[in-house]
Each structure stands twice: as C-alpha cells, then as structure tokens.
C-alpha cells in the first residue's frame, strides 16, 4: 500500500476540474537522495510513502504534514520543492510557466491572463486535503 500527495491547479482548463502539477513520492525520483530533506523536510523518503493504510483521514493527515513546507513557502522563493525540483527559478515563476503551458492557445488567457488560480493539494484518494484533520 502506497499513498500519494498531489498538487494541482484548480479549474484551469474546462476539460478537467484539476490540472496536475506534481506528486509525491514521484517527484523524489527527479532529485538526488541528498536533496529529500531540502525539498520536504527531515525524514521524508520514498519509503515513508510505502506500507501505509490508506484510509481517507490518515492519508489526508499525512499529506498535510508532509507538504507543510511547500504550503508555507513564499512565491518569490527559489528553494527546491515538490513542483520546482531544480530551483532554477522562483516558485511563482514556475507556476506561471505551467499556467502559460496549459493555456498558451486560450484566447482569453492571451488577451487578459488569469488571476486567483487555486493550488489545492489532494491525497492518494484524490480528495482535496482538509486542514482540520
């Protein structure tokens, strides 16, 4: 049993309610083991996502705790994180680049851009995280 934590763009394209940005533990495959703690904090490894009872409450709590660092990073940070594993640009610039990639042919986006795009986190059951758990 493995659980995952995914980060998405919400209501970006009309064909899907959420658009994929990245997930754990998958994103850890893109970096060296020595970078795990920089991206997620001490003690989080691909193995920590294994052999886990994936009921909704437990997966929600695990994802919320694991992604606390990602959620608290300012958009002008260049730190490595779940969606920006190379730290070659700010988190905000990376996210804007992803929006441009998805909407490059959208006439409304070309003429006026997009504001206030939500970035929800979902657990392995692909339910939006509830911060109360």
Image (cartoon, rainbow, N blue to C red):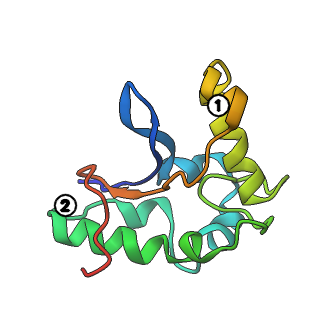
Q: Is residue 13 above or below residue 4?
A: above
Lateral position of residue 69 relative to residue 14, left or right: right
Name the residue located 79 percent from the left edge and 59 percent from the top edge.
Answer: 90
**Residue with the mark numbered 2:** 54
Name the quadrant containing residue 127.
bottom left
Query: Residue 84: image x %, image y %?
Result: 69, 53
Report, in whole angstroms, how far the alpha carbon at label 1 lies from the one at label 2.
38 Å
Q: Quadrant of the N terminus?
A: bottom left
Q: Residue furthest right?
A: 88
Lateral position of residue 61 relative to residue 75, left or right: left
Query: Residue 70: image x %, image y %?
Result: 58, 69
Query: Residue 103: image x %, image y %?
Result: 61, 28
Q: Which mark is residue 125?
A: none
Query: Residue 33: image x %, image y %?
Result: 65, 61
Neighbours of disc 1 within 10 Å: few (<14), some (14-19), many (20+): some
Lateral position of residue 86 relative to residue 123, left or right: right
User: What element does badge 1 sit on?
Assistant: helix
Q: Quadrant of the C terminus?
A: bottom left
Q: Nearer the viewer, residue 7 or 119?
A: 119
**Residue with the mark numbered 1:** 109
């Amino acid at each position: 049993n493995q659980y995952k934590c995914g980060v998405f763009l919400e209501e970006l394209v009309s064909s899907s309610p959420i658009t994929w940005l990245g997930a754990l533990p998958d994103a850890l495959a893109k970096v060296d083991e020595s970078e795990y703690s920089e991206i997620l904090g001490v003690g989080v490894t691909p193995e920590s996502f294994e052999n886990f009872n994936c009921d909704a409450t437990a997966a929600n709590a695990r994802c919320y705790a694991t992604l606390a660092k990602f959620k608290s990073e300012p958009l002008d940070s260049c730190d490595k994180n779940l969606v920006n594993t190379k730290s070659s640009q700010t988190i905000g610039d990376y996210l804007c680049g992803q929006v441009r990639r998805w909407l490059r042919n959208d006439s409304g986006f070309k003429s006026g851009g997009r504001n206030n795009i939500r970035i929800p986190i979902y657990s392995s059951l692909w339910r939006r995280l509830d911060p109360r758990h």
